[in-house]
Image (spheres, helix red, strand yellow):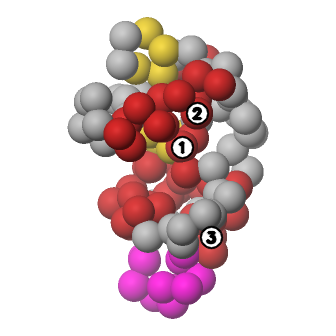
Amino acid sequence: MTSAMAPAEQRERIWRVVHGIPSGKVASYGQIAQLAGLPRAARLVGRVLSQLPEGSKLPWHRVVNSQGRISFPFGSEPYREQRERLLAEGVVFSGQRVARACFNWD
């Protein structure tokens, strides 16, 4: 399904969904793909987010993996940055996982 759509259109759809995640909430890469009309394209979501322009205001930090964990290596600078941003928004962690309640949003 992803191949029938132009890459720019796919990117825009992903950006729109990520932009819509409320502060204090998160979504998984797979959820973003599904909501963008790109089922089974979680890896594409990760790739698109990894290529954001410098200084982008898109709340990329609100996207975590399907286990509710930050995908960056534990303890790395990007991991710490994402976790700090989420904590500052009120996202609750249980160990390294985001609390399930933080996934509930429309």
Give the side of residue 49 with respect to residue 72, left or right.
Answer: right
Which labelled disc corresponds to residue 13? Answer: 3
User: In the rendered structure, which amino acid carries the disc numbered 3?
Assistant: Arg
Between residue 15 and residue 81, name the one nearer to us: 81
Alpha carbons under labels 1 and 2: distance apart: 7 Å
Nearest the camera: 64 or 79? 79
Is 76 included in the stretch rendered in magenta?
Answer: no
Q: Which residue is depicted at the point 54% across and 77% down? A: 10
* Residue 56 on image: x %, y %: 62, 64
- Badge 1 marks a residue whose secondary structure is helix
Q: Amino acid at mark 2?
A: Arg
Instruction: Locate the N terminus and report the quarter of the image it occupies.
Output: bottom left
Give the answer, above or below, for where 22 lies relative to 69.
below
Q: Nearer the viewer, mark 2 or mark 3?
A: 2
Q: Nearer the viewer, mark 1 or mark 2?
A: 2
The magenta segment is: 1-11
Is residue 104 visible to the viewer in this orientation of the structure? no
Residue at left 35%, top 39%? 77
Q: Position of residue 83 (x, y in %)?
A: 48, 29
Q: Is residue 62 left or right of residue 105?
A: left
Tell me the residue that label 1 is attached to.
61
Secondary element type, mark 3: helix
